[in-house]
Amino acid sequence: MTFWQENYSFIKDVYDMRHSKMAEWMENVEKAISRIMADKVYTSAEFKRERDNFHALCKDLERAEVKKWLAHILEILMAERAKDQRKSEFDKLEILIKKHEELIPTVMKTQVMVDLYWKCYAYGDELKPHIEFLDGIMLSSTRDIAPSCVENVDELIERQEKSLVQLETKRAVVKELIEKGKKILENPDKPKFLEGHVQRIEEGWDDTKNKAQDRLTLLQETKDAWVGYAENNETIASDFEKAEEEIKRVKKRFNLQAALDDLKKRQDIYNNSEKTIMGLFKAINDNFTCMSITLPEDKKKILEKEIKAVDEKLEVVGRFKEKVAKVEDFCKALGDFDASLKTINDWMEQATGELNDIKAAAGSMLPEDRVARTMDLQEDIAAKVEILKSNAATELELLPQGDKVPQDAQDYKDELNRITKYVDDLQAKTKKECDSYSEDVKYWAEYRTGIKEFTPWLVNSEGHCNDGLAKPSNLDEVKALHEKVSTFDKTCLQYLKVLEAAEAASKKMTTHEEADKEVAALRERYGKVKASSDSWMAKVDTLLKEWTLLDNTVTELNTWVAKDKTSEGENQFSLEKMESTLGELKNIFKQKEKLVDNL
């Protein structure tokens, strides 16, 4: 014991040193754990250094020998020391040992995490070349390109196809890595950065694959556009030439059926040409639009000028359309001209038949009917003459003139001349026939004028006769009625003269049987009206005389009665005369009442 006490200071220093080393070692372990478990994302090399450092620190994790030695030496050193010092030193050692015991589970857990983290970092290292590969493909698939010719496009297509082949070659490896990463992600203690690695490789693969395929599609479409642009320009130039040739073939034909057949052919050719050319021009513009996505600006300006030149040549379609439209108008006019000639030709036979019927029925047809039919025929012929004049003007405008006229056109000219001559001859014959009845026309007109004037009056007068006369109630009304009946009677005599004048005109016509029958019927009706008028005149004359007599008698009686009140009247008064006058007055009144009732 004396040895320990004599060498206390030295041994205590050794103890303190080993105690401090133990504490320092635990502190270093904690630091290593905190660095490993930090949020910082290391490179794999950096993490390897941390991992190796951690493993080196944890080689003798239990430190049993050290703890045993410290406890033994402290027991010897503190055997003869004060109680307070002894307690203090043992508390320090206890704290150290307790800390060590608490550190062991953390170290054990950290060792597991280190293995997991190292696996994740190794996974990241494994991903790195593949991600760099995908980045390279992505860069080549998204970088700006500006091919100036189809050969450049072919080169780019070849490169892009190689990139896709490379991608396809890597597919199995990348998919395996993705699955591997997802498997590690199932561990609940996985580091946060692992999910980013898996997401980057998974999305990077899909994005790169899509971008690479999109770039290849764009390049293939661009190539098709380059090829299509060249072919379509060549084709449309050829179609322009064909259209020019077809325009020259669009001509007027003067045989109607041949003209319509040829028009249908030209319309079909035009429609096909227009559809083809406009379709090609649209395709050229579509090609240019596709090419413009990658086309250099200088090349784009050159192609724009080429397209503008093609656009200017499209006027051939307009000329073709205009030429066909003119032939369409010509065919319509020729068809109308042809139809008009055929219509008049058919009518000529009917008109000739009508004139022959008029001539043939000269003996049996009434002159007025013959005149009316001849005048109707003349009006019809005059209308056709006007149509023929219009046809003649159309012929000058529609058909060629001069010495060398196509036979089909000449046929129309000859037909027009034949029909015109025939109608002119028919008009002359009809006029001659009508002139032979010119006097009848005059007398017929006079007759019809008289009848048209007389008939309305007769109808109106017959209405008055059916209505009868109004019954007057005083002398003034009788006078007015007398004046009205007198006027009506005079009017009857005036209109009789109108009827007689019309009859006289009809008698001058060659044949007037129908007119005689009509006049006779009107005379019969007139006779009834005149008889009513005569009857009214007789009744109204008598009524006026009786009413006037009655009025005079009443006046006379009143005058006589008035005189009776004077001295002179007394001398002249006679009862017999008064009775006689009253009796006469009564008779006159009765007669007046009877006449009024008989109106």
Image: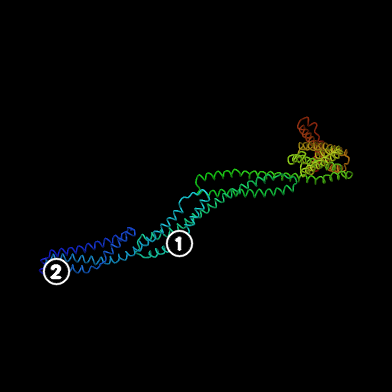
Q: Residue at position x 30%, y 65% from top?
A: 111
Element type at mark 2: helix
Q: Which mark is residue 76?
A: 2
Q: Is residue 281 above or below residue 23?
A: above
Whole-percent x and y of residue 251?
Answer: 71, 44
| Colouring chosen for the image of the structure | rainbow
* The one of 56 and 112 positioned closer to us in this rendering: 56
Q: In the rendered image, which quarter contains the N terminus?
A: bottom left
Whole-percent x and y of residue 484?
Answer: 78, 37
Q: Nearer the viewer, mark 2 or mark 1?
A: 1
Task: Examine the rendering and report whether any part of residue 122 can be seen.
Answer: yes
Element type at mark 1: helix
Instruction: Name the kind of residue labelled 1 in the image.
Output: Arg
In-image side of 110 versus 313 (left or right): left
In-image side of 559 versus 437 (left or right): left
Whole-percent x and y of residue 397?
Answer: 73, 40
Q: Is residue 23 above or below residue 316?
A: below
Residue at which label 1 appears: 171
